[in-house]
Image (cartoon, helix red, strand yellow):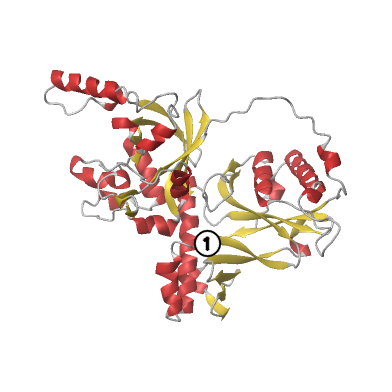
Amino acid sequence: MKSLWNEFNQKEKDEYIKFLQIFGALSGLFKDIKKGDHANKPYLYYRNHEQLFTRVFDVIDLTRSDSAFDALAQNGNDKIGIGLKTWIHTRDFTFQKIAEFNKAAPNEIEPLINQKDYLKAVEIVSKLRNERIQMDERVHNTSKNNHIYHNITRDNGFMNIVEESYDLIQIDSIQLLSHTDKVFNFTDGKSTYKYYRSKSLLTKEFRANSESILQKIPIKHFDDPFELLAMIDLPLSSFDTKEKVIYLPLYSNKGKKDNYKKVVNESSGLNKWHRKRENNRPWDVELRIPKWIHEEFPGWFFGHDFIKTELSTIDHQANYITENPTAQRLPNKQSKNYVDFTLAMPDGSYIPAAVNGANGKNLQSQDSKVLGKWLLQKVFNISENDMSDYNYNRTIKMKHLEELNVDSIKLTMIDEEKKIIEISLAEYGSFDKFAKEYGQYKVVDEE
């Protein structure tokens, strides 16, 4: 395996080490450094590790995205995915969490365990894990089979840097090593895994023996870490409290508020291309923006208030149709409720996009095929051959969202002046959490 650590330049590595030593020096803020078996083992919160790594090194930060990878690095001609982990060093080999399957477990894994088909159960677990990695490979245009885990283990007076390959599970080589009613231990010949039934949790055995440690970083504990904090002189500043992130659902709610079912509409949203086939519009998709989002965040799309301008837009539409009797609607770009901007895609590319429609209900790429190809081809793995086959009928359904652990799109405002919004996938349940935070339950205004 090629070491990622050895590819970084020395200046970056020195800065990384410096901040790890600072984090270690502050351990006393978060744990007892005088008592217990791990008293002299430094503390490092995993989010702090992720933030540090993506700040110091020239990588693409995916920690805000719901991705199988935490970061992407360009290594020669290869774009590689990086997993970041940290744990207390208690032994040379230890199991760490790599995936959860809360949505897929009841329907796809549990029935097999109940039938005592344990080998098939861990094969399905492995298949779901691989599919998520492969989806991110497509979405981010990474190289295949060339990804790396970059890990920090924390031992007495040291932090250790350890790396190993981030591999797909070799399903054809799986062997069940042992099992109870709750834990299933298996190997694919390269790595060992454990699946915990109660939490639908998959762990992998990572190594941290002396032969695999790339660098040992000495850590000095301070008995009184507040002495270090007192050295910080905070500048007076104003803080921007405007919400930078919103979520858009990839599904709708059918039914009443207290008795609804989540569905992906057959002929709109992700499946708009299916309705538009007769007009030869493959890959055509639209992301629906619930009306309440414009109400809760007026002006989020570069100052444009879609709700307030809707009445004048209606008048504008009526005048247009009066003057053009054969038309049904004013073209989007001439509508008052149209805002264009740029989407920063997960693979580093940029595409022109716009919000349009009544009450600003649709987000699309200006060439609707571009966003459609990203979602349908990269995420849901629909091929060119599939789309060109007029009889192809695999519309996206809720089960596909559940299998990939995706239910919404995360939009992050990254540059209001240049009108750039970052788009990424959000894990299953993200939109529910976002909607309930603002007292909203109806996911999308229906057609």
From the viewer's perspective, tell me whether residue 230 is left or right of residue 164.
Answer: right
Q: Residue at x 32, y 36 (%)?
A: 368
Q: Is residue 1 above or below residue 74?
A: below
Q: Residue at x 68, y 67 (%)?
A: 94
Residue 345 place in picture, x, y as percent: 47, 39
Q: Nearer the viewer, residue 4 or 413?
A: 413
Tell me the quadrant of the picture where the N terminus can be found.
bottom right
Tell me the quadrant of the picture where the C terminus can be found.
top left
Instruction: Inspect this view and state whether residue 139 appears.
Output: no
Q: Nearer the viewer, residue 249 or 305?
A: 305
Task: Give the labeled residue for mark 1.
Answer: 100
Q: Residue at x 51, y 66 (%)?
A: 200
Quick one: SS at disc 1?
Answer: strand
Residue 362 place in picture, x, y as percent: 33, 36
* Kind of residue indicated by mark 1: Glu
Residue 248 place in picture, x, y as percent: 41, 42
- Snapshot quadrant of residue 237: top right
Q: Residue at x 44, y 70 (%)?
A: 109
- Neighbor class of circle 1 (other Cα within 10 Å; few <14, some 14-19, many 20+) is some
Q: Is residue 361 above or below residue 102?
A: above
